[in-house]
Image (cartoon, helix red, strand yellow):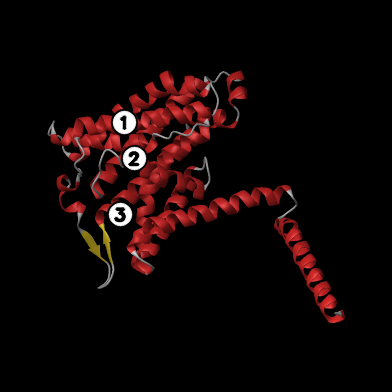
Amino acid sequence: MLDSLIQGLLLGGYYAMLAAGLSLMFGVAKFINLAHGDLAILGAYLVLFGVDQLGFSPWLAVLLSLPVMALLGWLLQKFLFTRTQAAGFLLPLLVTFGLGAVLQNGLFGVFGSDTRSLANYIGDLSWDSWQITDELSVGKLPVTTFAIAILVLSGLQLMLSFTRLGRAIRATASDPEAAELNGINSHAVHRSVAAIAMVLTALAGSLLAMRAQITPYDGPMQLIFAFEAVVIGGIGSLWGTLVGGIVLGISQSLGATLISSQWFQLTGHLVFLAVLSVRFYGTIAHQRGGWWMLIKQLAGPMTGWLSQGSIKAKATKTRIKNG
């Protein structure tokens, strides 16, 4: 049990990295990128290309891929996302869905369908662990991933709190029109946020390739994990993504340990649905005067139906007795 909790906690670090970019984009630009998972896989394949074809070390390839992905994010926001956002809520979803399909098939055309991994290039880090007790060990790579997530989220928080760009991002997220009136170019802020989100996404994809096998079609599942972590932790909350990622990771780990390995993903989905239901009914309860009032209102029709059924049953018995 303790081992499952620790493994789930460390897995949450990866989910936090994956979800941070999605949360940042939605919190600032009010934009859901359905190609988010596919862009993470693209970042992983860029690192694999640097290692396989150019002979770079894995960590150097990761560092070199980040500015490339940042530039891609900036260009996508400037020439694609901004124009689709002006057309309403539905068009960006359709465009990013199509972008994801293009990325999947493009990666398949270039790299093929074979599974790929960076595990062979990072040496002992891919499998080595620290032995805590006779029955408990902690992998070095999961700990490294979790530490990177904490450092990156801390750096983002400091940037948002103490830099000019960070203040512009917070102002734009709060009220874009008021920010424009104060001299902030909201479109430039959105492009910067897209670049930052793409860096986070690429880093998460690279860490995934170090710990698992990837294929060009793994993006949609990573999008689901990121979305679940965002919803569990709170949309637009930077540290909430860490909380959501940890909750998701622990629920998956416990499901696989306590029930079956086939429940690894299912338990995470169930926790996501439970949190989503609580948030949905919590909003309704707030509008109707609290949870107790909501329960009474929901129970009212059922109580009336049961009362009517009881009255009808009594009337039937009376008719039978009277013959």
Q: Badges 2 and 1: C-beta atoms under 8 Å apart?
A: yes
In the rendered structure, the answer to whether residue 74 lies left or right of residue 274 reads left
Label 1, secondary structure: give it: helix
Please name the amino acid that badge 3 sits on.
Val
Residue 283 position, x and y percent, is 65, 48
Mark 2 near mark 3, Cβ–Cβ under 8 Å? no
In which quadrant of the rendered view does residue 224 lie? top left
Q: Quadrant of the C terminus?
A: bottom right
- Local SS, label 2: helix
Q: CA distance from mark 2 to mark 1?
A: 9 Å
**Residue of label 3:** 143
Identify the mark at residue 219; answer none if there is no mark.
Answer: 2
Residue 53 image position (x, y, % from top left): 13, 32
Q: Residues within 10 Å of mark 3 (few under 14, many from 20)?
A: some
Residue 302 at x, y = what percent? 73, 61
Name the amino acid, label 1.
Leu
